[in-house]
Amino acid sequence: MTKIMGIDYGDARTGVAISDLLCSIVGSTAVINSHNTEKAIMDIVRLARENNVSQIVVGLPKNMDGTEGPRAQLCREFAEKLREATGLEIVMWDERRTTVEAHNILSQHNYHGKKRKNTVDAVAAALILEGYLAFRSR
């Protein structure tokens, strides 16, 4: 059995979420701290191999009207580099409002300041992955 990985790509921190073996819920999360895209990709490749990942879902930041801006293009380029490095299927997933939702969730659980900064990307990745897993199950 294999798992699915969700990615919330960022310039300084990249959130990672990995499904359970049934690909029905998020099983674990992590944050990769790196300003270096190649290092972030190497860390994701390692995590994918260690966790027997067969597919990666990368969040695609769209504008509220559905159009794509410069940040979306960066994420598409990152996803292509991931595909080349892993050989895995990459799915782009609309991530509108996931970071806002992640901040709301963390506020509700009293995560503030540095504690929130170090967690928000993992929560956003989990929300991206949850959305994709829900879509797959329909």
Image (cartoon, rainbow, N blue to C red):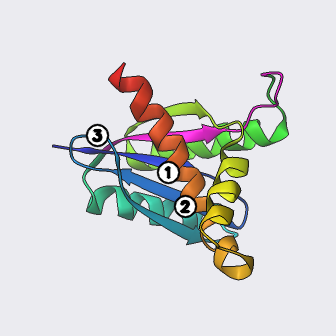
Q: Which residue is mark 3?
A: 23
- Magenta residues span 54-66
Quadrant position of residue 27: bottom left
Amino acid under label 2? Ala
Picture quarter with the C terminus: top left
**In the rendered view, does 97 fall on the left or right side of 15?**
right
Up/down of 6 relative to 68, above or below: below
Taking depth in this image into account, of 80 and 127 the one nearest to the observer is 127
Residue 5: percent from left, percent from top: 41, 48
Residue 108: percent from left, percent from top: 64, 62
Q: Residue furthest top?
A: 138
Taking depth in this image into account, of 130 and 32 the one nearest to the observer is 130
Q: Which element type, helix, strand or loop, lies under badge 2? A: helix
Q: Is residue 34 visible?
A: yes
Q: CB atoms at circles 2 and 1 under 8 Å apart?
A: yes
Q: Which mark is residue 122?
A: 2
